[in-house]
Amino acid sequence: MPKQSILNKLNLTPYLFLLPAFTILGLTVFLPALQAFYLSFTEYGYDISQPPQWIGLDNFKRLWGDRVFWQTLGNTLIYLVGVVPILVIFPLGLAILVNQKIRGISWFRVSFYTPVVISMVVAGIAWKWLYAENGLFNQVLALLGFKTGIPWLTSPDWAIFSVMAVTVWKGLGYYMVIYLAGLQSIPAELYEAAAIDGCDGYWKHWDITLPLMKPYVMLVAVISAISATKVFEEVYIMTQGGPRNSSKTIVYYLYEQAFPELERSYACTIGLVLFLGILGLSILNLKLSGGGERLG
């Protein structure tokens, strides 16, 4: 009787609705993740007909001494430091601008958001043309009096920053919309009261907007940081990691090891390190945002 009463009280209906989603996630996310974790401790390369051979921490020892891995990790950190502050600060300014109640403001919002809906493949090819030796950017420099153009994608000093510009261009509108949602949730009465007290213009955003937008700033910071650590399409389309690995990121190196080089186990090891890095960023976000502070 007690067991039967417990079963009667337990409502299985929500779990039945969740079962299809959990099944799909289990087959497409959790199971492959567990397999990748196991393969990172094995040797499983060119000959896929042979079962993986357990080698323990050998892949991690190889990773520790891999000069290219450390270079790609450094490139990823450069990407992180260079892209995230821009995507945290500038979209907030854009959101404040397009939040004004003026005629035709919707067109400005659409124009800023348009790069977000453009495929990265199309955007990468278009920017690659702009960066070409005889592309638009170098032609503009020539009109300004520069005798030689800039090797945007063919110089180790310029390549990664040129790719970063595309990431920023694509992301500005996306994060602007997140900020815009936060700005529109701030009661207008707060700004009216501040104006009565003589706080207007720049100072009203410093005293009201920024404190109330802190949860959104933290959200954008973490999302943009995770995206920066996982950047791949821009690199693949525009530089393929070159020249001399100067624009190769850790995700592109993982792809390179998994497919062209067929070093599957080593690629899983790189993926595990990447997972731990992203997990660390997520935990840092929870700490800085007060354990998941509610937006709004």
Image (tube, rainbow, N blue to C red):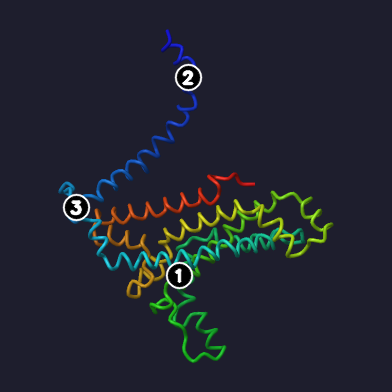
> Measuring 23% from the left and 56% from the top, which residue is drawn there?
59
- Please state which amino acid type lies under the numbered disc 3: Glu
Q: Position of residue 32 (x, y in %)?
A: 32, 44
Quarter holding the N terminus is: top left
Residue wearing tag 3 = 43
Report which quarter residue 199 is drawn in.
bottom right
Q: Is residue 280 above or below residue 142?
A: above
For marks 3 and 2, give the CA distance: 46 Å
Q: Which mark is residue 163?
A: 1
Q: Which label lies toward us, 1 or 2?
A: 2
Residue at mark 1 to residue at mark 2: CA–CA distance: 54 Å
Vertical placement of residue 15 versus 273, above or below: above
- Of residues 48 and 33, the one drawn nearer to the viewer in this rendering: 33
Q: How far across and down, in percent of the image, does residue 47 sit? A: 16, 53
**Label 1: which secondary element:** helix
Residue holding disc 2? 10
Q: Of discs 3 and 1, which sits in the foreground?
A: 3
Drawn side of residue 78 relative to residue 89, left or right = left
From the top left corner, tell me how far across and down residue 29 is, in percent: 37, 43
First reached walking from the N terminus: tag 3 or tag 1: 3
Q: Residues within 10 Å of mark 3 (few under 14, many from 20)?
A: many
Q: Compare residues 43 and 218 and report the one nearer the observer.
A: 218
- Amino acid type at image mark 2: Leu
Q: Earlier in the sequence, mark 3 or mark 2?
A: 2
